[in-house]
Amino acid sequence: MFEFFRSRDKSVRYLLTALLAMVALSMVTYLIPGGPGGGSSNGSDQKVAEICGETLTSRDVIGAIQNATRNKQVPPEMIQNYIPELINQMITERALACQSGKMGFNITDEDLAENIRTMLPNLFQGGKVSSEDYERFLSQNGLTVPDFEKNVRKQMLLTRLRNVALEGVIVTPQEVEAEYRRRKESAKVEYFAFNEDKFRPMVNVSAEDVQGYFGKNRVLFKQPERRSFDLLVLDQEKVAANFQVTDADLQNAYSANKDRFRTPERLRIRHILLKTADKKPAEVTVIENKIKDLLKQIKGGADFGELAKKNSEDVGSAVKGGELEWVTRGQTVKNFETAAFGLKTNEMSDVIKTEYGFHILQVLEKQDARLRPFDEVKAQLLEERKKQGVIEKLQASADQLRAALAKTPADAAQLAQKFGASIYQVKDAAPGDPLQEIGLNKDMDDAVAGLQKGGVTALIPAPGSKLAVAVLTGITPSRPSELAEVEAQIRGKLVSDKARQMALDKSKELQGQIGTSGGDLRKLATMVAAEVKTTPDFQRDGAVEGLGSATYFADAFTKPIGTIIGPVTVMGQTVVAKVAGQTQADMGQLATDRDTIVQGLKSRKARSRQDLFEDGLVSELTRQGKVKIYADMIARIRKEFRS
């Protein structure tokens, strides 16, 4: 299907070299067998599930897990809870893909091509690209063209099948009114807040406390393995500063690409449009009479631009006095083109009719087809050739530097000088330590962590259009920490724990005092020396200024004014509030929001219907024996990722 992407301009072949940053492909890569990061620790690739003849393997699942944690979609500490949900999602989507085929859904090559252009805008920003560049780009992301396109097609089928859930959803007027009230009601509260920070000055942690905690938890404290390495960095800006392009090079580029600089016959034109689409015959007659009157005014000396601003229904050009700027043949509908290219400069047309409506045209400027001269495009060529050349030279230098380092890693300093790279000797770095020139770089951390002494990393992209490579020079093993190394850490934890407990105790005390306070919020606030504040009005789905989500204060919409709410924990602080005001929805504005509310309710119902459909489908396919899930393999994967 790649003919939909085939390039007509060979100059885009170097595009991918410039794409040093990875494009996010996580939406489809976890579906691809053997995708990036795949493979279990013991090298096996065993069945996790079978769905309609397709096998979901441990490699597929582990690759998806690693992708999610690498992109910080899921915190590492949550991975144990995430794994079953991820596997369930992967099974469900394969089951849906199976069902979509039975229901006759089909994705054409044209549909697939358009969707891929949308997914990868950076890749296609210059137009079409060659099949070689497309394959190279996917390969750099650990993908093959067949697998990638197969799984994009699968995702499109899933979307179409899920959209079926929207069909036939009914929303009643009563539901719309209730939802409008829920959305538009507002409330406000008085409140005070405190957190553990308020109690930290009151906490005393002795040296004996620290020693005792360290003695009981010594096994928890380890100094991480540290690695020393030579870091070599190539900077695109430095390469560009010394890169020269001769006039002869530019002349050759101009001669080889003259077709790029040919401009067709073109017109700078303005128009007035009165639309007739979907109008009744009687209405069309009125519109035609109006535009004839506008033409008469212009011929009588009225300002074309002002009349266009006030009357033209082509909103894009009306604000510019009707100007469409430059137009070439083939850009407009036939009647418009015939009339426009038949006019002379500054000549105005009679009223013309197109499928859009009635127009008045005026040609402001005409240019014949021509070849732009070298002097006119020289600056453009220089910029293009220099950009291309710098990228190619940077990549070539980096490849040569890395190859030379692999042969003689001990010669890092001499090789850095030879290839114009900066070199830094990094001593005892732990993962997450910032590095000179490239800062915090997880890819470099991961690459260095996998080396033996004398090993060389792959080339690692870095911010600022840089490429970095490292040679490992030493490893300091992990070891148990000494008390002096972690004393501050332990003291901070003990202070935090004690302050948190004091805050919790005070919260319980406040809870007991609410019933006897008579609703006096300020009296309660004095117990923690806190300031009472009043929020602006907030809505159910909004946020409470200074406190976060309004969901924590749902009682403010239903309980009487003066009711005490809390204590509740919000954004790490304990909050006690009192309902201070309520405003009912203005039902007179319902009509304005009705369509949005209806669509929202339909989507909510559709999601519920979709969940039932998906659960039922997997259950039925399981009953039929078309879905088989291997729980023991899932348990092994969870164990492998256990902290």
Image: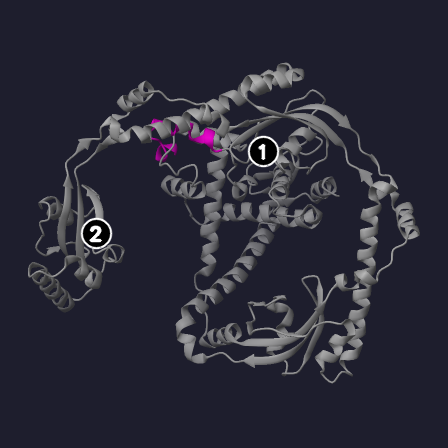
How many labels sit on residues? 2
User: Can I make out residue 101 in this image?
Assistant: no
The residue shown at (62%, 66%) is 546
**Label 1 element class:** loop
> 292 and 180: which one is in front?
292
In the rendered image, residue 208, in percent from the top left (x then y), is placed at: 93, 51
The residue shown at (67%, 21%) is 455
Query: What is the quadrant of residue 250 in the picture?
Result: top left
Q: Left or right: 195 with respect to 247?
A: right
Q: Is residue 21 above or below residue 596?
A: above
Q: Is residue 13 magenta?
A: yes
The residue shown at (40%, 26%) is 386
> 64 and 477: which one is in front?
477
In the rendered image, residue 548, in percent from the top left (x then y), is placed at: 62, 65
Q: Report how far apart the C-alphas of labels 1 and 2 lie in the structure.
A: 54 Å
In the rendered image, residue 419, in percent from the top left (x then y), is placed at: 54, 19
Residue type indicated by callout 2:
Glu
**Label 2 element class:** strand
Q: Would you name the residue on which mark 1 appears?
A: 34
Specify the segment rendered in magenta.
1-19
Q: For the C terminus, which image quadrant? A: top right
> 108 and 2: which one is in front?
2
Q: Is residue 394 above or below residue 291?
A: above
Q: Would you name the residue on which mark 2 appears?
A: 323
User: Is the residue under label 2 in contact with that under label 1 (CB below 8 Å)?
Assistant: no
List the single residue furthest toward the bottom: 518
Q: Is residue 292 magenta?
A: no
Residue type indicated by callout 1:
Gly
Q: Left or right: 570 with respect to 274?
A: right
> 219 and 641: which one is in front?
219
Q: For the N terminus, which image quadrant? A: top left
